[in-house]
Amino acid sequence: MSLDVKVWSAATCMLWGFAVLPGCSTAPAVVEPPPPKVTVQHPEVRELVDYDEYNGWMAAKETVEVRARVRGHIMEIGFEDGQYVKGGQMLFQLDPTSFEAELARAKEQKKIYEAQLDRDIKEENRQKALLPSGASTKSDVEKAEADRKALQAQVESAAQEIIRKEVELSYTTVKAPISGRISRAYLTVGNLVNAGGSDPLLTTIVSVDPMQVYFDIDERALQRYMASNPNRSDKDGAGQPKKVTVKEQQRPFLFGLETDTGYPHQALMDFAENKVDSTTGTIQVRGEVANPEGRFIAGSRVRIRVPVSAPYQARLVPGMAVLTDQEKRYLLVVDKTNKNTVVRRDVQLGRLLDDGMRVILGDGVSPDDFVIVLGLQRARVNYPVEPLDAEARPASAPQAGAGAEKTSK
């Protein structure tokens, strides 16, 4: 036998020997990876109220431009720029010298007329006494009577002129017509105030308490607010249509300043314009709010919320838990009854709250469900996961009293 044949025979025997020997070659076992960890939480239940939101501004209930009524030089200013003034407080004192002189002249003129009237009264009485004896005629009596009446009219006219001069003198003291916060003095001491058609503006005053809030709403919103107002009634006591009163237009609303968190202040809607602006389709409304501390300033911008629904119970989930599939929105929920398998729940979304929570409409989820809020990229539908709570502890079924309702204003 040749060498090649011997080598081939030996190799064949070795291959057959390995093939028949058991346990010489074993495949490695497949190790399943552990389920991915995800953070879950129960939907939160809150009492909510739906709102319409607007932007508005604050305005003073009373605004006055202070101007002088008479001509004169400013002698004194009785306030500091920006301070709070009371109604009747002296603001500007004009030079009263010329007005005092005019008043004194009017009073002296009245005395002259009164002296002449006293003389005419005596003359009339004397003519009447001489008439029976023929020493006086009827025409003399009538003339004396006419002279006496003319002097009486002049005395009355002089009295009215004195009143007018006194009023003009009082105008030299410019007083605050209302209480409120005053602006700066636009004219200083020594300036001439030229009252008349070109009378200059001295300063302005705005009232502080209460303040008013103005904003624009569309016509449909106004009709909806009026229809849902609990104080409104379309029928009178006899069942006949009646006019809407101011009280029936009143509606509470919330607002916040630019620096406020949320909407901490409440006002009462008490006025709506008498017509809709045809160019914008909106109507201006107004509310009033107390301002005893003077915190609100005229002209400030505000954010406004008008409630449009009664309180209702709503289910909320974090907005980051909502996923999108084409035109549908859905949540990933852990099925505790099926080995923590991930299932998909299509949902309808409501409004997004200020704290990032999203309202879930309909019956997409229940308060007992475990909604995945973190680790969504690791979760797959129909595959198990390891659910953990916010503190990285294993999530368990809700206990008695869990999921307590919260109230959201």
Image (tube, rainbow, N blue to C red):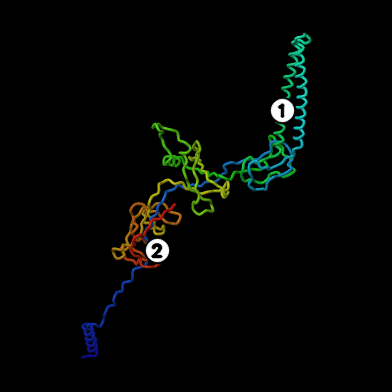
Task: Identify which amino acid the numbered label 1 is placed on.
Answer: Ala
Q: Which residue is mark 1?
A: 159
300 left or right of 391 in image: right
Front disc: 2 or 1 = 1
Q: Which mark is residue 374?
A: 2
Seen at 22% across and 82% down, the residue is: 22
380 left or right of 163 in image: left
Tell me if residue 396 comes above or below residue 86 in the rendering. below
Q: Position of residue 75 (x, y in %)?
A: 74, 42
Sequence-first disc among 2 and 1: 1
How many other residues sit within 10 Å of disc 2, few (<14), some (14-19) or many (≥20)? some
Task: Identify which amino acid the numbered label 2 is placed on.
Answer: Leu
Q: Nearer the viewer, residue 54 or 407?
A: 407
Q: Quadrant of the N terminus?
A: bottom left
Tell me if residue 218 comes above or below residue 7 in the rendering. above
Q: Nearer the viewer, residue 391 or 357?
A: 391
Is disc 1 placed on a helix, strand or loop?
helix
Q: Position of residue 293 (x, y in %)?
A: 57, 49
How many other residues sit within 10 Å of disc 1, few (<14), some (14-19) or many (≥20)? some
Is disc 2 placed on a helix, strand or loop?
strand
Tell me if residue 258 comes above or below residue 40 in the rendering. above
Q: Nearer the viewer, residue 392 or 238?
A: 238
Q: Nearer the viewer, residue 284 or 332?
A: 284
Seen at 63% across and 47% down, the residue is: 84
Write down the quadrant of residue 87 in the picture: top right
Seen at 49% across and 47% down, the residue is: 54
Q: Position of residue 78 (x, y in %)?
A: 69, 45
Query: What residue occupies the far right of the structure in this picture?
Result: 135
Q: Position of residue 8 (x, y in %)?
A: 23, 86
